[in-house]
Each structure stands twice: as structure tokens, then as C-alpha cells.
Image: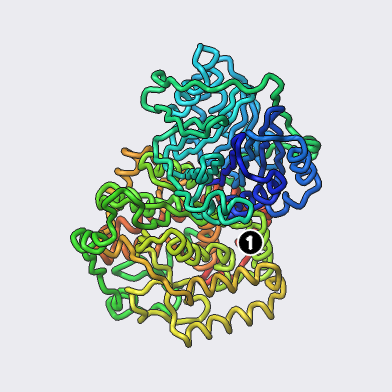
Amino acid sequence: MCGIFGLIVRHDSNFRLDATRSVLDQLLIRSETRGKDACGVALVDDTGIDVLKRPIRAKDAVRTTDYQQLVASFVQRAHAPLMVMGHARMVTNGDSACHSNNQPVIKHEMVCLHNGIIVNDAALWQTLSGAERQFEVDTEVFLSLIQQQREQGADLPRAFAAAFSQLEGANTMALVAAKANALLLATSNGSLYVAHSRNQSESIFGSEAYILRQVMRHPAVAALFEGSVIRQVKPGEAFAISFDDLALKPLSLDTPQTNAVRLAAAPEQRTIRDHDKYEAAFKRPKVASGFSNVYGANDAFVQRVHDAVAHLRRCSRCLLPESFPFIRFDADGVCNYCHNYKPYPFRGHDALDKLVTPFRSKNGTQDCLVPVSGGRDSSYGLHYIKNVLGMNPVAYTYDWGLVTDLARRNISRMCGKLAVEHILISANIRHKRENVRKNVEAWLRKPELGTVPLFMAGDKQFFYYANMLKQEMNLGLVLFSMNPLERTDFKVGFTGIDETNRKQDKHYALSLADRAQMLGYYGKQFVTNPAYLNSSLLDSFGAFISYYMIKKDYETLYEYLRWDEREIERTLIDEYDWETATDTDSTWRIGDGTAAFYNYIYYVMAGFSENDTFHSNQIREGMITREEGLRRIEQNNQPRYETIRWYAHIIGFDFEQAIAAINRAPKRYPFG
């Protein structure tokens, strides 16, 4: 999920050391697409391992005096062999404001770069009797496992392999120790690439082949790496790269005790120097991550909403209430949405297999891009595409700051067990969350159902990045796993656009006239509520372009497969130990940090939520009965307070004040 990288230079290299900073800058900045929360570097020579890390994005870090002085000092004193390596971090656990949580992680005279999530870190700590946990970041348990093995007599290669083999999830590690003259690499899902120069005197590694290709064109190394082949380290592979000869020496992860790799000892004077002058400034009081699942003071109000909603007229066939935009009922009480609905003509597995066959790799190379959000549909889609269709996918996630920790862990579980490379494109999460906060606070001043999607404006660029990765990786096929039953046309309806006759086979499509009407609606809202005229405008406009304007050259899995909730949940939970939420019995939308908040708004103000539309589509498809649908919306429309409070905490607005403003807002149904 983060970006790791490094350059190793042998003693006989022609690499000009005065170009070190320029190349390192490029490695840092290119890797920033994978994480903008923090960054760090480790500079390795005979005298020591100098570590510098900061809770800022890479492009800002390379401008700091600390960074520039450290690299300049290193270049002045160092001589080959040497290595520079680093990390661009997207926070998954461990607050980036605390120095020790950021990468590289230092412990037991080892320096480690980690990309991924160790989903069983809590269980592993329980096996480490006597080991002291000092940090929040999950990487620490890996270093403690290595140290345990070394204390039991294992040398570093065996200890490294034995520790890595215990990790669950999608993880890639790069490790250097103060007393060993080598770099150790391992990956569980193939998110690691290595290239050697023409004369084998230089080696470079990184999380993505595309990043390496760009850096290898840098004038300082282009001639050295001309014609070099970038090799993917396959899932389940591990290597030691000696600084003496740069040879890739395989390590066995299946039977770590059989490893016979001998590492040359580092010079006695090599020590680890952590160049951190601001430890106190980085630390801040730890905020409790858990919240009560019940917000008792609001229970009475929610019960009044339930009672009022229970009296709304609903379609006699589906679940949609009279407060739904543009709804009409016939003499039998059946709504116009049911009359206009056409059951989806799921094309079946055979048609899907025929579609993908021309793209299926015959030599094990990657053959398709699969966007994965961490939700149930995309997680199952990745399973199906890899295990049933026999494709060799690359998983892709666009993280705009509201992907939940639960979703990230589930992505790690899926990619780790399926041995699938995962490319994460990280937005400037601090910036995105600040934009969301501004729009939420603007909305709370003047609650309007049609402007709720502005909370999600920052996530729509996932279409753009899917197209970008398809081109960069030369992949012919993109397979999304969007569920057609999840259509939420009412969100457009709240802007005044009647889409009751819209074709169902088109995702995210609006006529030219409807687009103009929507822009007019938002323009009016911005004029009447100037608080929307903030730094989020570019995100909002970009979302509109990505959602409705750019070409979407992809196929959708669930247009071929009939969506089967029980099969999806059984497969994910039984085969992948897929994690569910603690504040709802449903597995839907639990990877989306925004959904609990906006569905509370829709339910309180409109008398229905996405649950009503989703379960209505299930009824129309004959998947559940209307009675079952009524039971589900009664259950699933309960407020998810734990997730709403988490959302308020990371966005930065007051939870209690927001709930009070929503509760006071005008409603589309009688409420006494």
C-alpha cells in the first residue's frame, strides 16, 4: 500500500556519487503516488545507516534543510559499496505524527521498509513472550519476530525468512541490519520489482515497475541501466542481495531453516543513526480509536423517526416510500420505478469466460486490472477473477482518505492469500479530508439533500487512475466489480433530475441536458451557501468530469454473474477470514467510511436510505421477498454510531453538533 525503493551501488560502480541526491529525490517523489502521509530514507555505507523520516509528503521533504544536509554529508564521506533506500507512507496503523511509527522502522539494530498490512499482528505479539511493544505500527512485530529467531540461534537470513513466513496479508519487506552487508527482500503478493545494471554493478528496487522505468531514465543512471530488464519478485519469493556482488541469493520461505545463505559482516564501525531532532514535536496524545456503539441521547429521536417513517406509504411491490424523488403509485399501489424496472439479463459465466479468454496470460504475466475497494463485491470479484476465471490480475485501489482500516485489512487479506500484486494510488489524504470537512461544515449550515454527494467528490478520480494504470502497465482489460443492484438514482433526483426512465445498462451516464441541469443546481447552491466556495471546488469539478465525462473502458463482473449474497459472504468469510464490522450485521458498505454518515442523513431527512433502494432491487430480481426486505431495512437503517464517530474524528468535525444539525433539518415526510 505504501511505496518502498532503493538503489545499491557496488565498489566498482561508475555511478557518480554527486548524483545521489538527484536520484534519491526522484525515487521519493515517484513513489509518492503510493503514500503522502509521511516519508523516510536510510543511507547506508561502511560507517553507518543514517535514517531520516518526516510526517510530510516526499515532495516537501526533499526541500527541507535536514534532508539536504544529510544527503550532502553522506555523499561527501561515502564511497561504494553503498545503498540509499526509502519509503513513501500511507498510514494504515500507527499515527504518522509519532516519529517511531514512520518508515523506515528501527529496532534491534535493524532498519526495515514495509509495504502492506500485517493482519495477524495482534496474534503474533501474543507469541512473543517477553518482547516489549514500543510502537503502534505493525512493522514492529516483524522485527521482534526476527530478533526472537536470532536469540534462538538463527542467522539473519533464516530469521528473516522464518519471521516473514508467519505474516498474514499482503506484505513486502526490505531490511538492512547494522552488522550484515546485504539487503534482504521478501514479498507475499509480488508488489516488488528489481533491476540490475548492464555490468551488474548497480541494482535498483521498487514497489512498481512503472516507477523503476521512470527513475532508470534519469540522466545519472540511464546509461548504466540501458537495456536492463525489470524483474518482478514473485509472490512468496525472498532474496538476499550482497553489497559485494549484488547477486540475488534466494531464501526459502516455505522451509526457512534450510536457508544456507551466508552474509558478509558489515564493518565494525557501522551503527544506526536516527537523525530526528523533533521527536517531541511529532508526538501528540493518542486518541482512543474505539467509540461506544450506542449514542443514548439520540435514541429517543431516532425512535421518533422510525415511528414517522413507519407510517409512510410504500410501494406494494418494493420498499420505496412516498418521500422518494419523483415516485408515483398506480391504483394497485405499485410505484413507477417497479413498472420501469427490467430484470438484469445476467450474461453468465460462459460469456464472461469468452470475454476474458483473449486477454488471459499464457506465461504467467499480469493480464488485467481489478479495482478493489475492500468491500464485499470487489473482494469477491478479485477471488473469482483469479481462482475461477484463471486470470493473473493486478489489484488497484484509489485511497482518498475515507477507505476504512477494516477495508484496508481486507484488501491485504485478499491480495496476500491470492498472491496478487496490489497497486495503491494515494491521494493527498490530509488535503482530501480537509476538503471533505469544509463541505460537511458548509452542508451543516444549510442542509440540502442534493448536495450530500459533495462529501464524496474526492473519490471519483478512481476512474481516471484506472485508465492511467491500464495504459502504464499495458493491460488490455479492466474488470470492475460494481453491483448493478446498488444504483442510487435518488441522489440525482434530489437535484431535480427525473431519471425514472433512465436505461439501466449504463453506469454513471447522464444526458447533456441533465448534466447542464445538475451544474445549474450546484451553481445555485454555491451562490446561496458561499461556504461551498472553498478549496474543494477543484475536487468537486474533477469528480463531475471523472464520473460523467471521461471514457470508461471497462467491463463489469456482475453484469455477467448473478449477484449471490450468501455465496459471496460464505466465500469471503470462510476462505479468506474476511473481517466484518462491529456496528452492523450487514456486510454492505462497511469499507466506506462515508456511507454510515450520509445514510443517516438520508434516513432522517428523507425517510429512506441506500438500503431501501438496494433491497428494493433485490425484491425486483426475486432474490428476497418483500417481507424480508422490510425486515432488513428496519435493521440496516439503524444508525451506525461507531463508524459515524470515526468519520467525524478523522475528518475533523464535531460529532454531536453534526447529529444535532441533521436532526433539526427539514424532512420530506410528516414529522411531529
Which residue is drawn at the image coordinates 23% and 69% (left, top)? 345
Res 445 seen here:
yes
Percent x, y of residue 573:
35, 40
Q: Is 289 placed above or below 368 here? A: above
Percent x, y of residue 585:
41, 46
Percent x, y of residue 223:
57, 53
Give the secondary structure at mark 1. Answer: helix
Between 260 and 104, the one nearer to me in the picture = 260
* Image quarter of residue 533: bottom right
- Direction left: furthest residue: 350
Res 301 seen here:
no
Q: On the rendered image, what quadrant is the C terminus found in?
A: bottom right
Q: Is 449 placed above or below 596 here? A: below
Which residue is drawn at the image coordinates 56% and 46% (left, top)? 3
Between 254 and 591, the one nearer to me in the picture = 254
- Count of numbered tags: 1
Residue denoted by label 1: 436
Amino acid type for the residue under numbered disc 1 = Val
Between 56 and 411, the one nearer to me in the picture = 56
Percent x, y of residue 390:
26, 50
Which residue is drawn at the image coordinates 50% and 50% (left, top)? 208
* Image quarter of residue 435: bottom right
Give neighbour class at mark 1: few <14, some 14-19, many 20+ (Cα, 10 Å): many
What colour scheme was applied to this rendering of the protein?
Answer: rainbow
125 sits left or right of 628 in the view: right
Which residue is drawn at the image coordinates 40% and 61% (left, top)? 474
